[in-house]
Amino acid sequence: MEWLWPGFLLLLGIIPLLMAVYIWILRRRRRFAVRYSSLSLVRAALPQPSRWRRHIPFGLFLVGLASLVIAASRPVAVMEIPTTKTVIMLAMDISHSMCATDIPPNRLRAAEQAALSFIRSQSDKAQIGIVVFAGFANLIQPPTEDQTLQEEAITGLTTARRTAVGSGLLQSLDAIADVDDSVAPMSYGTEPGIEAAPMPDGGFVPHIIVLLTDGASNTGPDPLDAAQQAAVRGVRVYTIGFGTAQGGPFGDCGRRFGQESFFGGGWGSGGAGSRRGGRGRCASPDRSFTRSWPACGTRCPARSSCAARPR
């Protein structure tokens, strides 16, 4: 155990001084008791109190004071959690505003490099999953220990309109629930789902969500409500922001984010675009149907398999 503020422990020296003062007061009362000898008959008629009971309030006061000093010293302990039981979800913003160049070369490239650096710094047994979100969220890589799959998922993203931060958090919670039965999954629409039992104060599960985004949410569930759902389940959320207060011009995120993007670029925080391009269409693998494709984390036609539920 360690102490964040060990200097406060010096205040424990007050307790012996208080005990000395208390004993001095008791002895002083005995010294002057003879002045009231005429009250002996009254004292004899009263019930005799316990010899130690009268000292209980003062003893409790000292215990409370010592507890307060120890708490103010901030004791901490390091606990080891097996990495094989820990799931780390990376929730990445792929809205058009991530192409802003106020963070060189642009916000999306910086987010990719940060995510790749994080993955490579983890052990081979770390289970990491990846969720991307723009207009809605999509799980593009379930939790896995294969770093090759994790890196391929991050380097194969495309951008889209709008920013649904809440959807990204809820999708991440569902991915964790698929791995750990103790974490209740989310319920959608008329599905009954499973009601999450609140964690005790200070309690948490070993899983975490790392949110990488550049702006405010402008569609989907309220991020604060989604964060509350994570807190109820004991899942910690860490946020990493990309961008500057002044913002920056909308740049080209590279070939796969330029002409091949299914939605044109735009300005504004949270991925709200001011100029639009054409909508793309994707065909199913067997060409049995075609449809307009909304925001998704992979490119067409491979993303025809990405007809995930909008969350």
Image: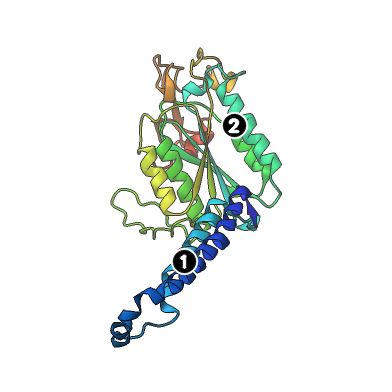
Rendered location of residue 256, percent (x, y): 57, 23
Which quadrant: the C terminus? top left
Rendered location of residue 305, percent (x, y): 49, 40
Q: Work out whether 86 lies above or below 272.
A: below
| Quadrant housing residue 253 | top right
Q: Is residue 35 left or right of residue 1?
A: left
- Residue shown at 47% from the left, 62% from the top: 64
Which quadrant: the N terminus? bottom right
Q: Residue furthest top?
A: 249
- Residue shown at 35% from the left, 31% from the top: 219
Q: How many marks?
A: 2
Q: Which mark is residue 156?
A: 2
> Mark 1 highlights which residue?
25
- Residue shown at 55% from the left, 57% from the top: 14
Q: Which mark is residue 223?
A: none
Colouring rule applied to residues: rainbow
- Residue shown at 43% from the left, 22% from the top: 269
Give neighbour class at mark 1: few <14, some 14-19, many 20+ (Cα, 10 Å).
few
Secondary-structure class at tag 1: helix
Q: Is residue 28 left or right of residue 10?
A: left
Residue 307 shows in this picture: no
The span from disc 2 to disc 1 (Cα, nearest Å) is 78 Å
Residue 12 shows in this picture: yes
- Residue type (three-letter) at the residue carrying disc 1: Ile
Rendered location of residue 109, percent (x, y): 60, 25
Give neighbour class at mark 2: few <14, some 14-19, many 20+ (Cα, 10 Å).
few
- Residue type (three-letter) at the residue carrying disc 2: Gly
Q: Is residue 32 left or right of residue 156?
A: left
Rendered location of residue 70, percent (x, y): 55, 56
Given residues 251 and 304, the one toward you in this image is 251
Given residues 239 and 34, the one toward you in this image is 34
2 vs 1, front mark: 1
